[in-house]
Amino acid sequence: MNAQNITLSGSETIDTQQLLLMVNETRKEHSEPNIRNNVFIDRIKDELEGEYYKIFVVQKMNNTESEVIEMTLKQALRVAARESKAVRRSLIDKLEQQSKPQSANEIIAAMALANVAQERRLKSIEHQVEQVSEEIEHIKQGTIPTGFQGYNYLKTKYGLSDAKCRQLVMAWNVPYKKVPHVAPGGQITQMSVVDEAAFKSARHNMMLEAEKRGSQWYHPKMGRFSVTA
């Protein structure tokens, strides 16, 4: 089907079935792959979030259901702005041919809004990329600040279990912070690191106040605990 011959309902609105045919026809002209209906619907919902549009559920020939969105030409133009430069130009030309002559100014205004929205999306993506790059750079340089150590190090050096190390930090308000960390699978997560000098001082005070009970120690803030170093 030739996308340019599709008739729009009332020349003011278009539904996703019509628009998707136009998009895929234009993509084909520029050697780009087709976009699936469910992906297209999700893209439109994201683009038109917070705006008014009509949505229907239609029965397909294979007895499955599919969503159809009816939108204005202005909204369709904003959806078109998400396509690649070559596809976007051709698609906008086709949408303009379907509009009423007197709506030319509205189309220009809609395209201006679409360009602004596209620019905002690009800036948002750039900002996210910068944040990820900064995190990766911090990791490369060593995420643990000078004077801070992770719990694995603290429990080994100071002879307390992981749980008791954390309890000591909370009970004596030892300074700690979270820093980026690369997990074994390569995923960037957050790990807690503790001010070692403050931790050492808190442990010293705890041991001065603790009472020996058999093979273990007792402190009101810590309960029973063992020390292996």
Image (tube, rainbow, N blue to C red):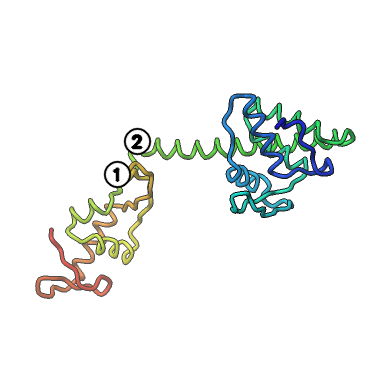
> Which is nearer the eye, 159 or 101?
101
Q: Residue furthest left?
A: 214
x and y, in percent, of residue 182 in the image: 34, 43
x and y, in percent, of residue 61 in the image: 62, 49
> Which is nearer the eye, 139 or 8?
8
Residue at the (29%, 61%) spot, across then down: 166
Q: Are marks 2 and 1 in contact (CB under 8 Å)?
A: no
Q: Is residue 188 left or right of residue 197?
A: right
Element type at marker 1? Answer: loop
Q: Residue furthest right?
A: 102
How crowded is the residue under tag 2: few (<14 C-alpha within 10 Å), some, or many (20+)? few
Q: CA distance from mark 2 to mark 1?
A: 18 Å
Indicate whether 154 appears above or below 117: below
Task: Name the front one of labels 2 and 1.
Answer: 1
Inspect the image, locate mark 1, and give the three-letter code of the amino acid beneath it.
Pro
Inspect the image, locate mark 2, and give the three-letter code of the amino acid beneath it.
Gln
Indicate whether 76 appears above or below 87: below
> Which is nearer the eye, 198 or 93?
93
| Dot label at residue 45 | none
Which image quadrant: the C terminus?
Answer: bottom left
Residue at the (73%, 51%) spot, across then down: 53
Q: Is residue 187 left or right of residue 99?
A: left
Q: How many marks?
A: 2
The numbered mark, 2 or 1, whose residue comes first in the sequence reads: 2
Element type at marker 2? Answer: helix
| Dot label at residue 141 | 2
Residue at the (24%, 52%) spot, across then down: 152
Per the image, the residue denoted by label 1 is 184
